[in-house]
Amino acid sequence: MSANGELGSRTVRETIPIPPEVYREMGLNDEEYRRVVAVLGRHPTYTELGMYAVMWSEHCGYKFSRPILKLFRKYREAIEGSGLENAGLIDIGGGFGIAMKMESHNHPSAVEPFQGAATGVGGILRDIFTMGARPIACLNSLRFGNLDDPRNRYLFEHVVGGIAFYGNCVGVPTVGGEVYFDDCYSGNPLVNVLSVGLVRLDEVAFARACGPGNPVMLVGSRTGRDGIHGATFASVELGPDSESRRPNVQIGDPFTEKCLIEATLEALKTGYIVGIQDMGAAGITCSTCETAAKAGTGMRIDVRKVPLREKSMTPYEIMLSESQERMLAIVQKGHENDVARIFTKWGLNASIIGEVTDDGLVHVYDGDELVAQVPAKSLAEEAPTYELDTEEPDYLRRVQDYDLSHIHEPDDYNEVLLKLLGSPTIASKEWVYEQYDHMVQTNTVVLPGSDAAVVRIRGTKKAIAITTDCNGRYCYLDPYLGAQIAVAEAARNLACCGAKPMAVTDCLNFGNPEKPEVFWQFRKCVEGMAEACEFFEAPVVSGNVSFYNETPDAVIYPTPVVGMLGLIEDVEKRCTSEFKREGEIIALICGWSTNDESRCDLNSLGGSEYLKIVHGLAVGKPPALLMEKEKRVHRAVLKAIDELLLSSAHDCSEGGLATALAEGCIMGDVGAKISLIANCGPAAALFAETQSRVVVSLPIEKLSRLREIAEEEQVQITVLGKTGGDKLEIKVNDEPVISVKIKDLSEAWRGSIPSAMEK
Amino acid sequence: MKFGVIQFPGSNCDQDAYFAVRDILQQPVDYVWHQESNLSKYDCLILPGGFSYGDYLRTGAIARFSPVMSAVQEFADRGGLVIGICNGFQILCEAHLLPGALLPNNTLRFRCKYLHVRVENDSSSFTHLCHRGQVLRIPIAHHSGCYYCEPDVLKELENKDRILLRYCDRDGNVTEESNPNGSISNIAGVLNEHGNVAGMMPHPERAVESLLGSEDGVIILRSIVERIS
């Protein structure tokens, strides 16, 4: 724009066809290029080409996943209705809402783990506070290869370090999450970060560029050359040349983010911001076209008004930069200074780079020269979608039909239990969460290490509980069932804290979707998850898809991570997983009845950590799940917690019943004497990962009421034994099989990860 | 009496300190922006935890040059009570309002956990409601909490009863295992010469409700209130 505000050129200079190798390098195929030409009615400029390439990538445009994601009810309703917001919003009553979203940063973390993970945290926080919500907690769901490999140790150390570096500085507590280790993630780590924020429902901010004539303001950091085409990088497989992609990884500045959080929330309070969107993937391109598309408006910006780190940046680079800690704010005309003043106070840039128009087009100027003129909707909402082929993978029958009859009982059950407790997937994650500030904001009322994190809502009696869950091995063995179990386990973890499920955010991590077997896994997982989320009344409200998680050597297990939010109406009625004191009853609340065949036999060891750790096998079918039975267990546990009957509640998951009991003992520093009756061998009784089971402890005088509740909810209560002593002792059918000092259990469980990392 | 909680860009325990004073102590409290120069209406200043200026360069090294710091210096010179918690402690050391320095933890990692500290001085304005040897359960959360000072300074601190808190085990034994960061002589908190400026790495403002796991931090905060009124 020239000095008097009039535009320079009004049409894009004459353009010439782009050579195929150029647009293919950017990630567009021939058909997609033809489509760009058809939309524009001419060949694109170089800047426009870059904008389409990045917005139509799988990472931004969901071109492969969108047709399948419509299985999620709320997603379908949103894209058919008012459009998607940056994060899902859940009404928790009392005028408050929770914004929640999970996102992956797998590819950047594979090549630059520290900054990759750090900027993952930064990105998800911006998704939350751009809605006017103050971030109140973060969780992360991580997957790494075997820690015997130094490269995996390096990735683990630096991913955790990056999360700590960023999360601790911004003052948002990292309250929980999960870490799994398996060879399939070797060199292909998964870094999924979840954040939740609190907002008054009448103060929610939207990502809409309303009101033609309103100025468009860029706030936060300067724009540099970092992260250009990060979204395109995330949409291809990792390979030997991935190291050269390191410049695609952004660099995080958590101090600026902290100031940006405070400044944004303060500025939103003025009421002068009519729309706001964070900048993540595809930077200015994405935020301008999405906010305009959502409001049905257009936008005119001048890249020369963008504060730059390097003056020589081209329009192409400015439009595609993924520099962190930036937001696009649409401000009420006449109040530019009121808003800018707040950002300046926090030491941040606030520059007007353009204005909202009414023509539905995004015009990008480089001074006087028009370098891009594209329909906002064509970028933001009209990415081509594909119905990809699916094909059941060959391996599936082989692993599911694996004959487990040759699996003999072990010689020494104590040794097996210690080995399982020391398996990094099961072992204590203290080494991880001690590096995270999990208490800042002083609302964390259940600290990391329990089944779910619990964060109170200050000024109310309420608290929220949050968990992330997904057993990738189950999903590999049966994607549909595995995804359902992820949802069921998340809801069970919440129930064990006393929280009722409210909503789910997901992070769907898969290999290359263009391979029919991978896309089959993806579709099956989404089908299973969608059905289970509806059943447990926790609809998917936001999420993220990460494909191409494979290297030439390995493709990851299908890993659809479930992040679930639950509500506790009275924070005093919460529960944790460790045994509390000597002399209490230990009981199992179980959804299966004694006649259910699936309850306990050799096959119930399918997919277990036991088979993996002791026999090196990832075979069998995952444990059976009947959602109705599962839900009854949740109801019974919730009712018992509500009536203050329980001292502890802990779900049975990886490592089975014996592991759940051992964890209750270790964390509570108290022993237990247990007697199990089983119609199967001790190995299955101890280590099978049978679903729909919760270990509880309670004073004996409360047992009769618990039995009544069990009857009302039609679940089984089995008294397993009592707390006390300094050992965990377990008999199966009156045969003593386990007897280990709590101190030794604790050493195996607590010492495993630190000693692996000191190698 | 009135508390002021100083906000530097990057402070992130400012709200926690503010809520602890307002809701638990039920005392008047203001946020004080780092560019403020008039502190005359306050009786006690809290320099909260966090990452002022991102901890870039060195913890507290930039914040000590904030405009408010010369006013804090004058406030302390006049005998006003100043308490620096975590990053606040680091800033007070950088500003030479307290002796010594806080180095990166000997583990070279950030550590956040509940631990125990033993009260070494039970007559200071910050600890007089405790008794000597009392064990408090209060969390830490820091990357640079390894207290160091020259041997002659250490001797002076010991002789003049200026060591407030030491890391210990749950029974009050000051041991190497209970030292979370490599601090010299297990020091977790110190006083200035006149006893009106205190710094500590543990976060008393995080241990103010049983809901949060401990109320032991209240004893420290309430000591301040009682001393002033």
Image (spheres, rainbow, N blue to C red):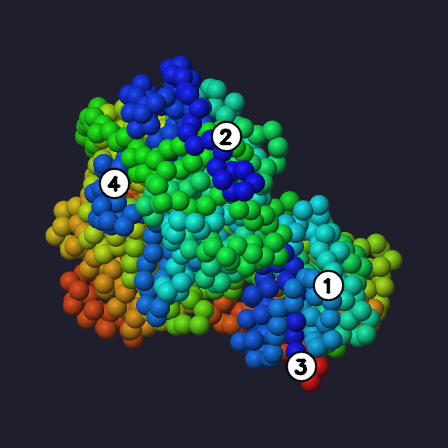
Q: Which amino acid does label 2 sit on?
A: Glu
A554 w.r.t. A178: above or below = above
Indicate left or right for A706 with A189 as reference: left
Q: What separation in Å lies between label 2 and label 3 (alpha carbons)?
A: 63 Å
User: What secondary structure is found at the residue carrying circle 4?
Assistant: helix
Question: In the image, what residue occupies the spot 52% across and 32% down?
Answer: A368
A264 w.r.t. A310: above or below = below
* Chain under disc 3: B
State the residue in front, B158 or A187: A187
Q: Name the residue under label 4.
A: A69
Say the numbered circle drawn on residue A369: 2
Earlier sequence position, callout 4 versus callout 2: 4
Question: In the image, what residue occupies the spot 49% across and 33% down?
Answer: A8
Question: In the image, what residue occupies the spot 54% across and 42% down?
Answer: A4
Indicate left or right for A83 with A453 as reference: left
Earlier sequence position, callout 1 versus callout 3: 3
Q: What residue type is labelled 3?
A: Met
Question: In the image, what residue occupies the spot 68% across and 62% down?
Answer: B34
State the residue in front, A513 or A598: A513
Circle 4: is it few (<14), some (14-19), or many (20+) Cα within 10 Å? many
Task: Establish whether labels 2 and 3 are both on one chain.
Answer: no
User: What secondary structure is found at the residue carrying circle 3?
Assistant: loop
Indicate left or right for B65 with A708 as reference: right
Task: Establish whether labels 2 and 1 are both on one chain.
Answer: no
Q: Mark 3 points at which residue?
A: B1
